[in-house]
Each structure stands twice: as C-alpha cells, then as structure tokens.
Image: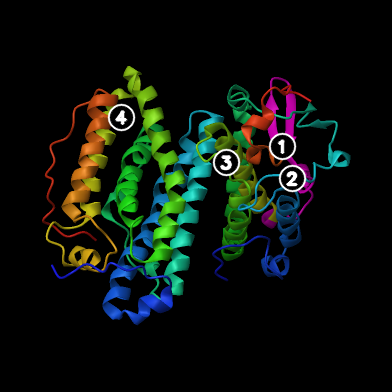
Amino acid sequence: MARYYELNAPPEGFAVDLGPGGDRVAALLHGLVTYLPPGDAPHRAERGPSAGRVPAEMSGLPVRRVDDLPAAVLDRVDPLWQALLENRRSQARARLRDADREDRLELAEHVAMLVATPRLRPADPADADALAMSGAVLWLVGTLVATALADDRDDRLADLIAGGWWPVGPVDGAFLLAPLDLPRRPRHELLGRSSHA
Amino acid sequence: MPQTLMKDVHDAAEACALGDEYVTALGKIINSHVRNEAAGAAVFDEPSIALAPTPREKWLACRMAMEEYGHHLKFNKLANELGLEDAQSRPPLSVFDYQVESWTGYVMTKAIVDLAEIVLMEDLCQCSYVPLRRLCRSLMPEERFHVGFGTTTAKQLAADPATREDMRSSAHRLITMTLPFFGRSDSRNNELFRRWGIKRLTNDEARTEFVRRTRVLLCDELGLDYPEVEPRWPGTTN
C-alpha cells in the first residue's frame, strides 16, 4: 500500500487504485476538499453548501437545515439510525474482506483520514462540542468510504457530503442537515444566531 | 554522566552528522511513539466508539481515535526522514494488553494512559532535535483534550454508584500497568537520552510525576483510593 503521511487532497490515480467504487470514494473526498479549508488555514466560509442537492426528505423524514447544533441536539440523534449505519459499515467491511479487497479499504480509509481529519479540526482545540461534530463527520465518512467500495452504488448521504452538507441524522421527527464546515467555524461566529435556518 | 548536548539539532542531516549514537537514541524515542500511538488508536480508541453511551460521546471517541492515528503518522514521518527501521514489527508496550470492556474502562484509559503520554511529551517539548520538539508541542493541545475528556467524564461516572467500582478497578489496573511505560530505573537508554539532550527527566522522575498527577486525579478529584505502587521499576519493558 502506498504510504502517505500528509495529504491535502486524494492523490492522483486514487480512484483507479481503489477499483470498483473508487470514483465514489474520490467524489466524497473531493466534496470535503471543496467545502472545507485546509487544516492549517484559518476558516473562511468561501463556499456554502450546494442548495440544489438537498432532498425534501431523508429516511422518511422531512429535511431541516440548521446553522448550529447545540450539544443537547447532538445527543438526540436517533441511536437506531446510528446503529443502522454501523451495521452497514461492518457488513461492507466483511464483504470487502471476503473479496480480498481489504488492502483497498485500508488505502481508502487511510487517505480519507489524512484528507478529512485536519480539515475538520475545530478553531478551538478544546471545544468539545466542535470536536464531537468533527467526529460525527469523520464517523460518517468512514462508513461511506466502506459502503462505496463494497456496494458501488448511489448513496444519498455521500451525495450530500459531496455537495457540502453534513447529514446529521434524524432528530425529533426531522432529518437535520448542517453545513459541512460547521465543526471548523469559530464558535463566536455562531453566537447570537438562530439555531435553525 | 558526561555533559549534556546543549545545542539545537535542526534536521535529519544535522542529526546524522552527530553520529550513530544520537540517531539511534532518537530513533528509539520516535519509533516507540510510532508503535504505541498506533496501538492506542487500534486497541483503546477504535473499539470504544461502539461502547459510547450517547451519540455525542461516540463522535468524540471517533475524533480522538483519528487524532491518535494522526499522531502515529506524524511520528512515522519523522522516523522516515531519519531512515529508521519499521517500528510496526515491534510489539507495543504492555499497557496495551489492557482490555477495554466498558465505556468506563475507555474513559479511564484517556484519563490515565494519555496522562502518561503527556508527562513524556512535556519532557520531549524541550528536546534537542527540533523536528521532534516541534511535533510534540503541536500535539499537546490534542493530548490535553484527551486527558481533559477522560477526567471530566470520570468525574461524572464517579458520582454514579453503578459505575464507581468499575472505574476504581479500571483505574487501579491501568495505573499499575502504565508504570513500566516510563522504562527501567537503571536504564542505559535514558542515560543516553539525557546526555544527548533528547530528554531531561530520568525514568523515575517521569514515573514519579505520573504518580503525583494520577494521585491528585484519583484521591482529590474522584474520591478514590490509590493503588500501592513502587516509584521504581527494576524490570524490563517490552
């Protein structure tokens, strides 16, 4: 496996190296690169998420866009939805293992981690809420990398990330979407704003 | 002990110019971090994501797992620049034999094992090898957050009689298992590290500092007793 220590974007030929589903993994990571500034750059909302890619409903629930997520809302994300995604991830990983593509999964996860983790580093390294949000996006990206490689088919969650959205999940009867760069935004910029758009 | 190296060593070429002894000593420190940061992510952090009781805690565990893996890669980059052997062929430290079986157990790994890492890294923040010094300084905010997460969550768990005993037994086991982390009391390696200005503390000094800080955590902040431990470690570490 190619050894990378730092990456600003997926390396050249990455999609081809991954084989089936590689284009989808690359598109997902290019979404992160497009909508999140590099890890060492100060955050600037240069490009907002693509409004044209927002569905009216997700998981049978109406979609609601939010500009901020207080910690209490994070804790109300439906645990069944989380469990469903974790199950999808473990099944995808098992299928890749059975198909002798574990090394491709390892490469995809390694590159995803290198591209995503610094781009999702909060402005304040001690901001636990922002770190939790960052972890939520990383958790979802990790899941979608595995399912893209194993299934090689359209996925609405992956499309949303590629369009600059973070699909937070079902909360209180709605499916929440937040801007992908929310974990990066300095918290003082969010103060005083309405929590729902 | 002969005189300590007082000057800064700015890059791999300067390190190599100082001779094999310096590069070998530096390599032992860097490769230990390469191996053990990866072990921490794989053995403690990743499996614990599934143990988190709330979504927010699950995602925090995920973020911390990614950060630990990132630390592994950053040390690996330094190892690569110095042309060091592959650290992954070596076994990790024995503390990683600890089995995380509960969320409480995981929280205590962050409060205790990551605190040991901070004690070591604080020393390396003065290291003569500038790339290692800079790396350790850059990683401190993340390491401090991990320990802060462990400490804050441990205080919440300590207030719950249902988790208190699990926390106590995890803490005692982890403290006992972490003491060898700092190396033997009469370590020839540590003597070299200090001679070359890579470290400032003896292994026993670092271990004593770890005991002091974990005693504050357990006894003053969590209201627990402290295990009986020896500040010296005559054995060998793996």
In the rendered image, which residue does mark 4 sit on? B167
Residue B202 occupies quadrant: bottom left
**Mark 3 belongs to which subunit?**
A
**Residue A167 disc label:** 1
In this orientation, which residue lies closer to the viewer: B197 or A144?
B197
Disc 4 marks which amino acid?
Met
Label 2 – label 1 distance at C-alpha: 7 Å
Closer to the N terminus: mark 2 or mark 1?
2
| Crowd rating for badge 3 (residues with CA inside 10 Å; few <14, some 14–19, many 20+) | many
**Mark 4 belongs to which subunit?**
B
Q: Secondary structure at mark 1?
A: strand
Label 4 – label 1 distance at C-alpha: 35 Å
* Residue B4, image x, y percentages: 22, 67
Label 2 – label 3 distance at C-alpha: 14 Å
- Picture layout, residue B64 above or below residue A178: below
Label 3 – label 1 distance at C-alpha: 13 Å
| Crowd rating for badge 1 (residues with CA inside 10 Å; few <14, some 14–19, many 20+) | many
Q: Secondary structure at mark 3?
A: helix
**Residue A161 disc label:** 2
- Picture layout, residue B209 above or below residue A61: below
Q: Residue at x 21, y 59 (%)?
A: B237
Q: Which residues are magenta?
A: A149-178
Closer to the N terminus: mark 2 or mark 3?
3
* Residue B80, image x, y percentages: 45, 72
**Mark 2 belongs to which subunit?**
A
Q: Furthest-front residue in view?
A: B7
Q: Are marks 2 and 1 in contact (CB under 8 Å)?
A: yes
* Residue B203, image x, y percentages: 19, 55
Disc 3 marks which amino acid?
Gly
